[in-house]
Image (spheres, helix red, strand yellow):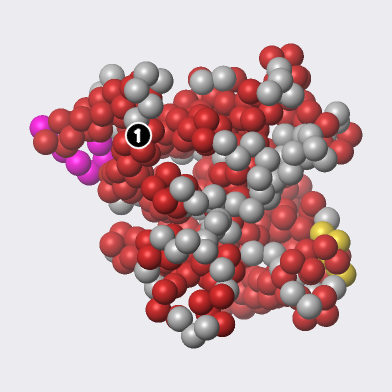
Amino acid sequence: MNLVINNSPGVFSKVLLICVIFGFFTILISTWFIGSIEVFYAWIIILNIYLIYIFKNNQGFLLLYIFCLFYTLSLIPYYFFHIDVSVWEDFNERKYYDTVLKVYGIFLVTPLFLFKKSKDKFIYSLAIPKNPNVIGFFTTCLVCASIIVWGQSGSNVFESGGYGYSLNESSKSTIYEYFIIFFVLAYYYSNRKRNQVIILFALFLIYVIKSLLFGGRIEVVQLLLLCYFILVIDYKLIIQPSIIIVVCLVLYYLSQIFSSVRSNPVPLLQGEYVSYLNPFEYYSDSRVSYVSSNEGDVVQSSVRLVGLIENGFLNTITRIKAFAFFIFSIFVPSSWLPEEASLITYKKDIFNSGGGGFIAVYFYVFLGWLGPFIIAAYLFWIYRLTLFYKNIYLKFYLLMIFSTFPRWFAYNPIVLFKLCLWIIPILFVFNLAFNSLKMIIINSDLR
């Protein structure tokens, strides 16, 4: 196997790569015998940082592994300060967290075996071809506008009194999340001139504002990622990797301060603002019993799945059924399928959680220890296919994968195979219809 790292040639890079892999598996194996889980967790942090380094010139994977780092670091309070990372208490035992960490580690180490240096850069591998079509543009814009108007209704954050209340008092159709598909197709069919770009920007702005008003954040993040990739790919936007990393870490730091305030507002009420600035000092506070954060809730949700396996609620037969129904749910609504089709809600009436879960843990449930390796390998397989074939449908699928990773990585893996994959048949049908209409109009004009 060729172990050449992107933009990291030379003997030193190969030796470093081998050391990282060897260290990972050595410490991983040792956790089953001497219980050195803290050392293993520290190595996971190093591994995640190393991934960010080797993918620094690939905007898609760079942002993905920066995002992973937020979840990697979220376990610092648990392993180094013995503080819970979620308010939920079901299966809150060290052995379940240890299993999640090992599964997550396998997901992170897999790219070191699969990624090869390529002459084709990220920008060129995902370049979106031009296909200006007036009918296609206005049709997809009309679909986008319809989704904005009818895709979500109810009470916004001002009417309901807050973010959490808005989520409970609003109704959001599944189609609302599919806005991103029709938006990128509208861009594909646009002539990319001023008038049509203004229309696209207006749709973008209205969707973002409405999503935020109704407490939706992840849809906004996904749309921002899509627009960022479009700017990088088609308009050659250049932002130094160091700037991207610093900005993301600053945002993460600010989110940690917010989480600290939410978990323990007492110092804030007492005017001890400085105590929040140093997270390690905050973790050492005896008054702190848990740290509330989105990352912590995702970890706990993953722990819940491991706990269900270990306690017999997800036996081998149930896990096989869950995987089969997961595949079926790509084509049919999950509401039509048995409860095993959605592990997010499976047995949630008995064992609660904050929702979501690592994609690596979902595939651990489906396929055992091979699961996290297989799903990580799948991402690079799609990427390599795109580099090799330059197929428009693969380009759009990969673009959707990179744009929606906050959803499929930490919330629901079905997005990777449903929302992302559905762009292929939709694009195929639209191209067939709009190109045919275009030819009919051209032929009629010639007559």
Give the residues in magenta: 5-11
From this view, report whether residue 391 is shown above or below residue 88. Answer: above
Residue sitting at 29 percent across and 23 percent down? Answer: 26
From this view, report whether residue 25 is shown above or below residue 143. Answer: above
Residue sitting at 69 percent across and 65 percent down? Answer: 216
Between 401 and 437, the one lying in front of the other is: 401
Q: Quadrant of the C terminus?
A: bottom right
Assign the magenta stretch its main secondary structure: loop
Spot occupied by residue 446 in the image (x, y as percentages of width and height): 72, 58
From this view, report whether residue 330 is shown above or below residue 271. Answer: above
Task: Answer whether residue 355 is magenta in the image.
Answer: no
Between 311 and 47, the one lying in front of the other is: 311
Please say whether residue 139 is visible from this viewpoint. no
Local crowd size for mark 1, using a 10 Å CA cut-off: few (<14), some (14–19), many (≥20) = many
Tell me: 255 left or right of 69. right
Furthest-front residue in view? 286
Tell me: 286 left or right of 436. left
Spot occupied by residue 19 in the image (x, y as percentages of width and height): 20, 30
Q: Quadrant of the N terminus?
A: top left
Residue sitting at 40 percent across and 20 percent down? Answer: 32
What residue type is disc 1 on?
Phe
Q: Secondary structure at mark 1?
A: helix
From this view, report whether residue 100 is shown above or below residue 46. Answer: above
Tell me: 45 left or right of 17. right
Spot occupied by residue 306 in the image (x, y as percentages of width and height): 61, 30
Furthest-left residue in view? 11
Tell me: 340 left or right of 372. right
Q: Quadrant of residue 150?
A: bottom right
Please say whether residue 286 is visible from this viewpoint. yes
Residue sitting at 51 percent across and 77 percent down? Answer: 267
**In this figure, which residue is indicated by the disc labeled 1?**
40
